[in-house]
Image (cartoon, rainbow, N blue to C red):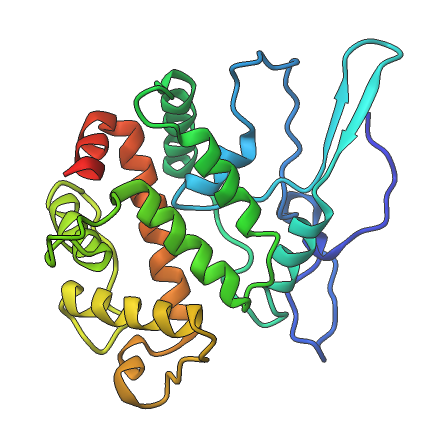
Amino acid sequence: MVRTHRQGLWEYQWAHITGELVLLPPDQWRYFVLTFPILEERFPPLEYVLDLAPVELEVGFKFFQWDAITKGFSVQPSRVFQVLQGGAFDDQEFFIQVTRRDIDVIARLLRQLQSHDEKLIPLQPLLNQLYQLKTLPFHSPLRFLGYFGLLESLLTHAPKPDDRYDSITRQVKTKLALLENRWSSRLDYSAFNETRPGKIWTKMYSCRSQIAHGTAPNFDRGEMAALKSYKHALRLVKETVKAVMSHALEEPQLINDLRNC
């Protein structure tokens, strides 16, 4: 059933703040309406899968209908609000083009998540935390720390007190180096002044420590200048979490072994 509604920004050209809003033809509206039968209990929330995908799509609202009488409505207001806040009117990355390959990747992730053995690596709690991080303001330092917490949960164990080489920082750097040799698509470090991943992660951990201890990193000078900006640093740690979590679906035993070595 098609219902008349008031158009939102998804049906207009993405204009500058002072620009004119121009209504797009319906075939250029930037959203999809999906219909599907009631899902099985084992079916993971669609948002979990989309958060892992290289091209992230957002679910705004969900309507449910179990029978002619029983209906429901689901929305996460804080997440929707913060996602919209994250995109400025002149942000050309806010709306994206979805390709057939993107859909194939999402479908593969969905199948892997459905068959994943939670006893080997309990990903559901981590996926829920990944989902919740988008309810925080984009520029909140807590979001940055949250992604680091997830990365450490995926790759590290508590350091051995008598082993000075077993630090969290060293574990992350060495284990990421191992994983990157197995990935067909490596992490993108091209935005940074420093080209060596190990050096970049040393600075990323310095940034993390400053934030954790209440200091605002200065990206204009000093060691933080290599990271360029908070936006660049946040994107790197976020994309790294997604890559490691996706690999946990591909090779769960490997990730489990890495956590314990």
> Which residue is nearer to you in this view: 98 or 122?
122
Q: Nearer the viewer, residue 65 or 127?
A: 127
In depth, the one of 161 and 80 nearer the eye is 161
- Extreme residue in the bottom direction: 221
In the rendered image, the vertical position of residue 165 relative to residue 120, given as above or below? below
Q: Left or right: 67 with respect to 32?
A: right
Residue at the spot 50% in from the left edge and 59% down from the top edge: 143
Q: Residue furthest top?
A: 67
Q: Residue at x 52, y 37 (%)?
A: 128
Tell me if 234 is positioned left or right of 199 in this view. Answer: right
Q: Is residue 3 left or right of residue 132?
A: right
Residue 96: horizontal and vertical position, in percent? Answer: 50, 52
Residue at figure coordinates x 38%, y 45% from the top left: 54
Residue 257: name its quadrant: top left
Locate the C terminus and report the quarter of the image it occupies: top left
Q: Position of residue 174 (x, y in %)?
A: 13, 52
Residue ID at (39%, 77%): 229
Residue 221 location in percent, x, y? 32, 90
